[in-house]
Image (cartoon, helix red, strand yellow):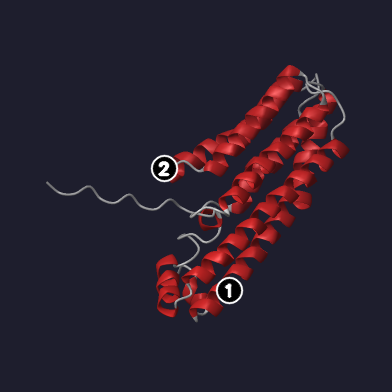
């Protein structure tokens, strides 16, 4: 009997397509199709949320494994839908927008004092770095513990990026969304919030994470003697 062929690796997602599906399309639906002469408030909200929800589910199926960030994204989308269906005060949307990154930040921060700080999963992982080569070089120089301390410090910094996201999300939501959920005005404000959250919250958070990657790589270079190109996954 011949062995089953290995499953080919999943193709890398197109970031522009992801932004279009999870940000641009939902925002357009909310702002343009929520009127009574179009889809209406609840159908437009449901359609808008279907895009990020469908993307999160498809991403999990494509990867053939559970991605906890995608799961949290799906949960966050469902919570937004629940707020809309229950016609809750807009303050609850701000609380939800802050609660998700706060929860992630707390988990990341707590992991800094465990044997497996989450920076290993989110930044220093096998998809970005040649982890085996880095670890071998660290062991050869006796710098394994020093690098672990750097990972712990990086994990605290990573948690800080999520806490920044929580605070920025809360105040941005309070500034943009004022109407009661379930109304046409709420949908339009939610659409504007979706568009604004990318440049105001997501991009600064990504820049912070990129800075953490550079800081971690520089520390690894000093401790291993390897150049950055040698440490990164080819």
Give the vertical position of 203 relative to 55 (above or below): below
- Which residue is drawn at the image coordinates 59% and 38% (left, top)? 72
Q: Where is residue 140 in the image (x, y as percent from the top left)?
A: 40, 78
Which label sits in the foreground, 1 or 2? Answer: 1
Q: Is residue 133 left or right of residue 128?
A: left
- Do the residues bearing badges 1 and 2 touch, measured as CB atoms within 8 Å? no
Where 203 sits versus 194, above or below? below
**Image location (x, y in percent) of residue 214:** 62, 69
Nearer-the-camera pick, 115 or 169 = 115
- Residue 39 visible at all: no
Residue 219 is tagged as 1
Query: Please, which residue is most extreme toward the left here?
Result: 1
Judging depth in this view, the residue of 151 and 191 nearest the camera is 151
Q: Residues within 10 Å of mark 1 (few under 14, many from 20)?
A: some
Compared across the picture, whether 138 is left or right of 1 comes to right
> Mark 1 falls on what kind of element?
helix
Q: Distance between the residues labelled 1 and 2?
A: 33 Å
Residue 87, position as x, y percentages in the image? 77, 19
Residue 84 to residue 192: above or below: above
Task: Identify the residue at image location x=55%, y=59%.
Answer: 123
């Amino acid at each position: 009997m011949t062995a089953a062929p290995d499953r080919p690796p999943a193709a890398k997602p197109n970031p522009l397509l992801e932004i279009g599906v999870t940000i641009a399309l939902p925002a357009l639906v909310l702002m343009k199709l929520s009127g009574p002469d179009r889809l209406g408030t609840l159908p437009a909200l449901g359609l808008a949320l279907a895009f990020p929800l469908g993307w999160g589910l498809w991403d999990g199926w494509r990867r053939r494994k559970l991605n906890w960030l995608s799961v949290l994204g799906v949960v966050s989308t469902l919570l937004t839908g629940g707020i809309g269906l229950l016609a809750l005060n807009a303050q609850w949307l701000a609380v939800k927008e802050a609660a998700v990154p706060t929860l992630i930040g707390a988990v990341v921060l707590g992991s800094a004092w465990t044997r497996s700080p989450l920076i290993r999963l989110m930044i220093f992982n096998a998809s970005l770095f040649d982890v085996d080569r880095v670890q071998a070089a660290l062991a050869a120089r006796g710098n394994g513990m020093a690098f672990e301390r750097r990972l712990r410090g990086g994990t605290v910094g990573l948690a800080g990026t999520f806490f920044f996201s929580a605070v920025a999300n809360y105040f941005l939501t309070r500034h943009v969304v004022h109407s009661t959920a379930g109304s046409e005005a709420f949908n339009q404000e939610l659409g504007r919030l979706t568009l604004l959250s990318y440049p105001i919250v997501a991009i600064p958070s990504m820049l912070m994470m990129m800075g953490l990657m550079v800081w971690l790589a520089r520390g690894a270079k000093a401790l291993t003697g390897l150049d950055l190109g040698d440490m990164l996954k080819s």
